[in-house]
Image (cartoon, rainbow, N blue to C red):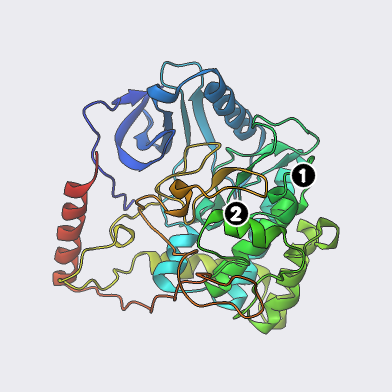
């Protein structure tokens, strides 16, 4: 297993619930994620809530995430391994997936081919359908929450998951939670109760990103994104979408949840795209995994005169740990706990945190024709990187990893 972590700090625990902690793989405002190992040698991602923020509400939220993970299961869900929400430092252990998240993969290697995007869509829609059957919604599906492991993609972070029939929220009135660029209009508007349509919309945003490298709506701040998402007159940006995926993504990103396909329909439409290419669904699934795994083992070219991007040096994506405000190193774009529109600008949310990877999903760039106030709606896409496999390249990579670890703020 090719695991690269940052070392433990002196104040970090060395063992929790029988899991030996080996290093840090992510952090956020609410706590820390460690690479752990069970007594039998099973790797795990261990979330720990910071002592400074442990209170009754944070324990309740954490306990809710644990109960959700106990409820759901499946080959595309990172498995629950253990937890203790009542410990002095509440912790949760889940399956460790050895691979990058979708956000980092697209940033590093570019968009997926159309047929592989369709395979990803079929896999994730089937997984979401199983989650919905259990009466749950994910509510925060995004590229950073999809890990591309050696056995195929898996969904992580059910910290915002909620029961579909529930109208009760742990958030304050007139507040919404989630990631703006992947958030359905009704979720952004604070509607209750939510339906399975919010996850279908989010999956559409994920597939759009996988196929093109951009989201349906992008802007300089999360609040500007909220405005675009909830404006029924502003159509999603589907530029660059392959023709065979356009009808599917148009339907999934419909303004009204009633106009979106069900997860089962998404699976069937993805199958149709794949079969139109003369390929069977099982073959496309295998090709997707082979494609992402082969790219994950390539070393991007790094100029010796430039500061290395952490994305080029960290092999496993950090797991997001705040079940409410996902302001972590792994976020492709910041998730927010924000008042419903209209809102005031919060400078903290307009600047992404120092990131283990960053997709540049919202920032200065090209204006999008036909949109009001198009200032800073798109960052230019990065050019592809040429893999290097020489001994010198490996030595350079090791030097860059060491340099990054030395500069880490912990």
Tell whether 157 sits left or right of 263.
left
The percent coordinates of residue 208 (x first, y second) are 61, 69
Q: Which mark is residue 221?
A: none
Q: Nearer the viewer, residue 397 or 368?
A: 368
> Who comes first in sequence, dot 1 or dot 2?
2
For disc 1, the neighbor class at 10 Å (few under 14, some 14 to 19, many from 20) is some
| Residue at x 59% of width, y 32% of height | 65
Q: Is residue 394 above or below residue 315?
A: below
Per the image, the residue denoted by label 1 is 191
The percent coordinates of residue 352 (x first, y second) are 42, 53
The answer to whether one can see residue 226 in this image is yes
Secondary structure at badge 1 equals loop
The answer to whether one can see residue 153 in this image is no
Q: Nearer the viewer, residue 376 or 191?
A: 376
Tell whether 84 sits left or right of 382.
right
Tell whether 167 sits left or right of 211.
right
The percent coordinates of residue 136 (x first, y second) are 72, 39
| Residue at x 39% of width, y 75% of height | 382
| Residue at x 42% of width, y 55% of height | 99
For disc 2, the neighbor class at 10 Å (few under 14, some 14 to 19, many from 20) is many
Per the image, the residue denoted by label 2 is 180
Q: Quadrant of residue 91?
A: top left
The percent coordinates of residue 266 (x first, y second) are 75, 64
Q: Quadrant of residue 173?
A: top right
Secondary structure at badge 2 equals helix
Q: Is residue 70 above or below residue 56?
A: below
Q: Is residue 343 above or below residue 399?
A: above
Quadrant in which the C terminus appears: top left
Q: What whole-number distance in Å separates the C-alpha atoms at marks 1 and 2?
A: 15 Å
């Amino acid at each position: 297993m090719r695991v690269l972590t940052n070392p433990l700090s002196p104040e970090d625990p060395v063992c929790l619930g029988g899991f030996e902690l080996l290093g840090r793989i992510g952090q956020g405002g609410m706590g820390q994620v460690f690479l752990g190992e069970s007594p039998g040698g099973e790797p795990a991602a261990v979330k720990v809530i910071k002592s400074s923020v442990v209170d009754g509400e944070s324990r309740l939220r954490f306990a809710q995430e644990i109960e959700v993970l106990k409820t759901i299961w499946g080959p595309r869900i990172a498995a629950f391994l253990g937890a203790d929400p009542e410990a002095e430092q509440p912790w949760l252990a889940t399956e460790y997936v050895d691979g990058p998240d979708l956000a980092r993969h697209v940033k590093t290697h570019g968009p997926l081919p159309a047929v592989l995007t369709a395979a990803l869509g079929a896999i994730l829609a089937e997984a979401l359908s199983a989650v919905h059957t259990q009466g749950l919604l994910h509510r925060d599906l995004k590229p950073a929450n999809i890990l591309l492991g050696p056995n195929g993609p898996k969904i992580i972070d059910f910290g915002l998951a909620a029961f579909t029939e529930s109208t009760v929220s742990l958030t304050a009135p007139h507040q919404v939670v989630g990631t703006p660029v992947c958030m359905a209009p009704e979720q952004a508007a604070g509607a209750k109760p939510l339906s399975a349509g919010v996850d279908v919309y989010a999956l559409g945003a994920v597939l759009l990103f996988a196929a093109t490298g951009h989201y349906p709506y992008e802007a300089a701040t999360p609040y500007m994104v909220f405005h675009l998402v909830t404006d029924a007159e502003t159509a999603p940006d589907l530029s660059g979408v392959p023709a065979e995926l356009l009808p599917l993504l148009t339907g999934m990103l419909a303004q009204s949840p009633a106009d979106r396909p069900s997860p089962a329909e998404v699976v069937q439409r993805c199958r149709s795209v794949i079969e139109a290419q003369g390929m069977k669904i099982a073959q496309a699934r295998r090709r997707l995994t082979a494609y992402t795994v082969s790219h994950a083992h390539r070393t991007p070219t790094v100029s010796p005169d430039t500061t290395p991007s952490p994305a080029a040096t960290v092999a496993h994506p950090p797991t997001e740990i705040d079940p409410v405000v996902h302001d972590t190193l792994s976020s492709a774009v910041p998730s927010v706990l924000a008042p419903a529109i209209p809102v005031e600008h919060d400078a903290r949310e307009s600047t992404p945190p120092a990131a283990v990877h960053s997709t540049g999903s919202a920032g200065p760039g090209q204006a999008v024709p036909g949109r009001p106030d198009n200032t800073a709606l798109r960052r230019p896409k990065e050019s592809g990187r040429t893999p290097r496999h020489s001994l010198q390249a490996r030595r350079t990579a090791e030097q860059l990893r060491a340099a990054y670890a030395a500069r880490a703020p912990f």
